[in-house]
Image: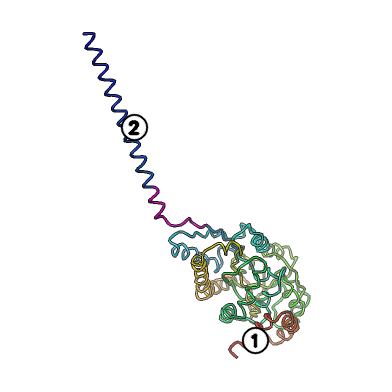
Amino acid sequence: MMKKNIWVFVALILTMTMIISGCSGSTDVASTSGEASATTGSENAPADVIEITFADYGSNLMPTADGFRDVVEYVKEKSNGRIIINYVPDAVLGGAAESMQQLMDGTMQMATVGSGEYSRFTDKLEAFQLPFLITNYEMEDYAFKSEEGQALLDTVEDLNLKIIGIAENGIRHFANNKRPINVPSDLNGLVLRVVPSNMLKDSMELLGANPTPLAYGEIYTALQNKVIDGTEINITSLYAMKFYETIKYVSEIGMYPFPSTVTVNLDFWNSLSADDQKIISDGFALGSKNVFEKYLPEFEIKAKDACTEFGVEFNAISDTSAFKEAVAPVYTNYKSKDPKIKAFIELMENYKK
C-alpha cells in the first residue's frame, strides 16, 4: 500500500511538471507572437503625431477665431490626424508682444501677432496700416497676396520668424466719449489709445489727437477710468470686448485694416516636411477665406446692431480728403525708408485705377 502511494505521488509530480512546462512554452510562443505583431504594426503605422500649440491674443468670440477653428479641422483631416493644432485664444499664453518674443526665442511654435507689433524690430510691415491706403477687405486680400506684399512679409525671416497666414477682425474707426468726429479738428486734444506703433502714433498726431500707446488688454480699464477719451478700433472688437459699455460715439472712417499675422518660429517651420508645410499653409488660406467671405461680414452687422441697441451713436465720415491730406507726410516718410515699402505703397495707390 505504501509503495502504491509513492508511485501515485511520483506520477502527480511528473504530471504537474509537464503541465507547467507546457504552460511555459505557451507563454513563450504568445510573447514571441506578440512582439512580431507589434513590430509589424509599427511598420504600418503613420509617422509620429505633430502637436502644435497655437497662441492667439484675440478673443474666442471674434470672427478670426471661427476661421482658426476651421484651420484646426482642415489640418487634422488632411493629415489623417497626424498634425494636431492646439488653438489657445483669449491671450491665455500672453499678449501679442509676449508671444512675438517667445516665437523669436523658439520657446513658442505658433501665434498671432498684430502687424503693429513688428514696429519694435522692423518698419516694413507698418506699410500695411498706412492710414487710408487699404480701405476695404478686397484691397487687403489683394495686398497680402501681391508680390510686393509678400516681399514685405518675407523680411521677418531676419527675426527667425515666418508668416504663414493672415487674419482680420475689421477695418478701424474712431471711437470716443466726447463727440462725433467729422473733420480732423474734431480730434484736437482727444486722448486716443493707439496700437504700440511709431507710424500710427505719428499719424494720429498729424490728425490732431493725443495718441497713447496701450496694450489691447488695457483698453477697457483705461476707458472706464477716463485715462483715455477713446481709441481707434474695429466694430467687432467694440462688441466682443464690451468696449461699448465705455464708449459713446463711433465715427466710421475706415482708416486701415488691423491684420493679425499667423507667425511661426522659423526653425520649427523648417523642421517640417514640405508636404506638412503645405497642409498647414493651405489650412490657414482656407481659414482666411472663410473669415473675409463669411464670418467677418456677418459679425460686423451683428456687432453694430448690438452696440446701437446699447446706446452707442454711429456716424459715417463721408469726406475723408482732409484726413488723407493731414497724414500725407507719413507716406513721404515711409516711401523713403525702403524700396520694398515704396513699391508696395505705389501698388496700392494705383489699385484698380
Frontmost residue, 124 versus 3: 3
Residue to which mark 1 is pinned: 349
Residue 268 to residue 235: above or below: above
Mark in the foreground, 2 or 1: 2
Task: Identify the residue at horizontal 61%, vertical 58% (top origin).
Answer: 108
Frontmost residue, 222 versus 19: 19
Q: Residues within 10 Å of mark 2 (few under 14, many from 20)?
A: few
Q: Position of residue 166 (x, y in %)?
A: 58, 71
Find out whether the residues at labels 2 and 1 contact each other: C-beta distance under 8 Å: no
Q: Residue furthest bottom?
A: 353
Magenta highlight range: 38-50
Which kind of residue does numbered mark 2 sit on?
Answer: Ser
Q: Is residue 43 magenta?
A: yes
Residue to which mark 2 is pinned: 24
* Label located before the other in sequence (2 or 1): 2
Which kind of residue does numbered mark 1 sit on?
Answer: Glu
Quarter-of-image position of residue 149: bottom right
Residue 183 to residue 84: above or below: below
In the image, taking residue 228 as reference, residue 91 lies left or right, namely left
